[in-house]
Image (cartoon, rainbow, N blue to C red):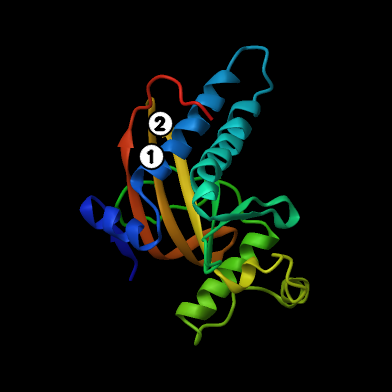
Amino acid sequence: MTDVHEGELAVHRLRGLSLTMDDLEYALAVGDNQARYYRTENDPPSMSGLARWAGTVRGLRNRLVPRGWHKKNPRNLPVTLAPDHSFGIVSVTGNEYTGIRGFTPPSPVRPPGLVTLQAIGWNLQQFEPQLQLPFGDEELELMAEDSTGGIGSRILWILLYRESQDKIWAELSQPLLVEGGVVERWQERILVPTYSPHGEVSP
């Protein structure tokens, strides 16, 4: 059963992670500013989405690193680590179920890569060790090399976000199980209030 936090419960849960809702909203706003900048008819079609991702990562790190957080980039996956290194956060685009409470769980729009898969596998081992990791022999052999640069031995959270109808929908959630390239189960979901960004945010 997934724990879904929203409203004051979400604020309280974030506080337990040394985070605030302002931290997440700032990161999302920086990403949105970058995405809007690359929406001219002369930009590559994928540039806006790439800029949103990069801006969100940068915005989150700009807020957290001065407070003692750390950053690692195993296999070019930008992970922001808590001050005590107990967990890490990655940012990815989510599907249409991102940021809303419902029967269908959200998922990244693209299948997780090897580093993320390994970290999710560790999540599963920590919270439900009786379950087997959902990987084949070839994947397990690759994962034995610890491609995460140490991230795989820590809890992984994903900052999922999406834009729809000029609004940002997002959540900070803890993946538990991946099947067929889709995150099927989450341990926890912390919903960010839906909002419409206005103006510019200095990165």
Marks 1 and 2 sit apart, C-alpha to C-alpha, by: 7 Å
Task: Classify residue 25 by image quadrant.
Answer: top left
The location of residue 41, given as percent across then percent down, is 62, 12
The location of residue 170, given as percent across then percent down, is 40, 44
Residue ranking furthest to the bottom = 130
Tell me: residue 100, above or below residue 178: above
Q: Secondary structure at mark 2?
A: strand
Q: Residue at x 58, y 39 (%)?
A: 58
Q: Are marks 1 and 2 in contact (CB under 8 Å)?
A: yes
Q: Crowding near pointer 1: few (<14 within 10 Å), some, many (20+)?
A: many
Q: Which residue is mark 2?
A: 164
Q: Residue at x 49, y 87 (%)?
A: 130
Circle 2: residue type: Ser
Q: Secondary structure at mark 1?
A: strand
Q: Earlier in the sequence, mark 1 or mark 2?
A: 2
Tell me: residue 131, above or below residue 36: below
